[in-house]
Amino acid sequence: MERLVVLDTETTGLNVESGHKIIEIGCVEILNRNITSNIFHEYINPLREIDEEAIEVHGITNDKLKDKPIFADIYKKFIEYLSNSPLIIHNASFDLGFLKSEFELSNNNSHLLEKDREVLDTLKIAREKFPGKRNSLDALCSRYEVDNTDRNYHGALLDAKLLANVYLKMTRGQTKIEGLSESFVEGNNENIVNVENRKERIIYANKEEIDLHNNYFK
């Protein structure tokens, strides 16, 4: 039984080396290429101010986080949720850099996050498949027809759900196991649907279009 975890974070700013921290973690489980309702979602008190530029991206303010747990308080259940599953992350170096910093600041060994764990970076995968094109999450949603109309702000759980659908579409045919359905498992997934089940319709060219095509190459 193949289990994958799609992970995303939101932070107080862009540079972990400047002391910025994680304020939201969102994870979605993919089990045998089915998105399940087994999620992990936590808002985290960073014990520091959030940059105004970051607030404009994710809409999360310090007031919203003042009664939330610190990372050390959610660390154990976060690791238990991840188990030893491979991770799917868009721009993995960013999220993993912040997570490793949080592990160190809370006096926890980051080897539990990284040791022998496969990490699938969808940004790298997309750049290999679509060199020279935009490969942001929004661009991939558009390319793979994943509905992201509710994404007015970035959000860790919302983005993880979107990325899970993008990943399944992106890797269709690569890891499909014969006899297994790839239907969406209902849960707290709101209006995001699994694009794997959409039936493709082949539209053939008519005679006029074929003649135009042949004349063009002549």
Image: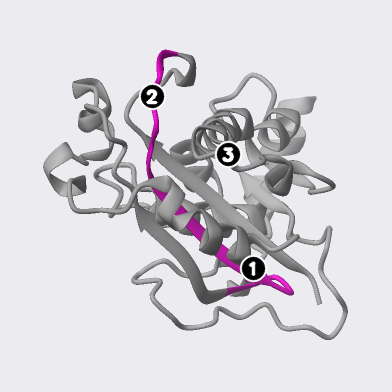
Label 3 to label 2: alpha-carbon separation: 19 Å
For the residue pair 27 and 18, the one nearer the viewer reads as 18
* Circle 3: residue type: His
Residue lying at the far right in this picture: please name it: 178
Q: In which quarter of the image is residue 36?
A: bottom right
For the residue pair 153 and 81, the one nearer the viewer reads as 81
Q: Residue at x 47, y 21 (%)?
A: 16
Q: Residue at x 77, y 36 (%)?
A: 214
**Main SS class of the magenta portion in the image:** strand
* Circle 1: residue type: Ile
What residue sits right under mark 2 in the picture? Answer: 20
Label 2 to label 1: alpha-carbon separation: 30 Å
Q: Quadrant of residue 123?
A: top right
**Which numbered disc covers residue 90?**
3
Mark 2: which secondary structure?
loop
Disc 3 and disc 2 in contact, CB within 8 angstroms: no
Q: Earlier in the sequence, mark 3 or mark 2?
A: 2
For the residue pair 85 and 164, the one nearer the viewer reads as 85
**Vertical comparison of 106 with 160: above or below:** above
The reply to whether residue 70 is visible in this rendering is: yes
The magenta stretch spans residue 130: no
